[in-house]
Image (cartoon, helix red, strand yellow):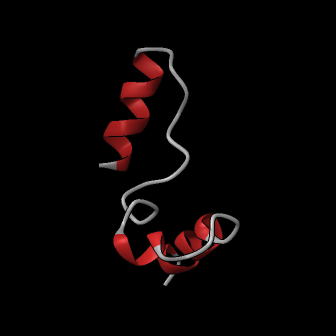
Amino acid sequence: GAEKALFRALKTRSKTPKYGLLYHSTFIGRAGVKNKGRISRYLANK
């Protein structure tokens, strides 16, 4: 999914995706705006 999104962005010359599915999940949604990216990256590295 992430690879597909990256190449789609490169082909259409749009911005590359900054966050993935984790960022938009309900679990991360309960976190504060300031910590969403940090928590998403932490979970992705587990």
Classify 44 as above or below 12: below
Q: Position of residue 2 (x, y in %)?
A: 37, 48
Q: Residue 38 lies in what quarter of the image?
A: bottom right
Q: Position of residue 39 (x, y in %)?
A: 58, 76
Determine the residue positioned at 41% across, 66% down.
22
Name the residue furthest bottom.
46
Q: Nearer the viewer, residue 8 or 21?
A: 21
Classify 45 as above or below 11: below
Q: Is residue 6 left or right of residue 32?
A: left
Q: Position of residue 28 (x, y in %)?
A: 46, 73
Classify 31 as above or below 14: below
Name the residue furthest top.
12
Determine the residue positioned at 50% across, 40% down.
17
Determine the residue positioned at 55% across, 46% down.
18
Q: Nearer the viewer, residue 33 or 6?
A: 33
Number of labelled discs?
A: 0
Q: Position of residue 23 (x, y in %)?
A: 46, 62
Determine the residue positioned at 61% across, 64% down.
37
Name the residue furthest right.
34
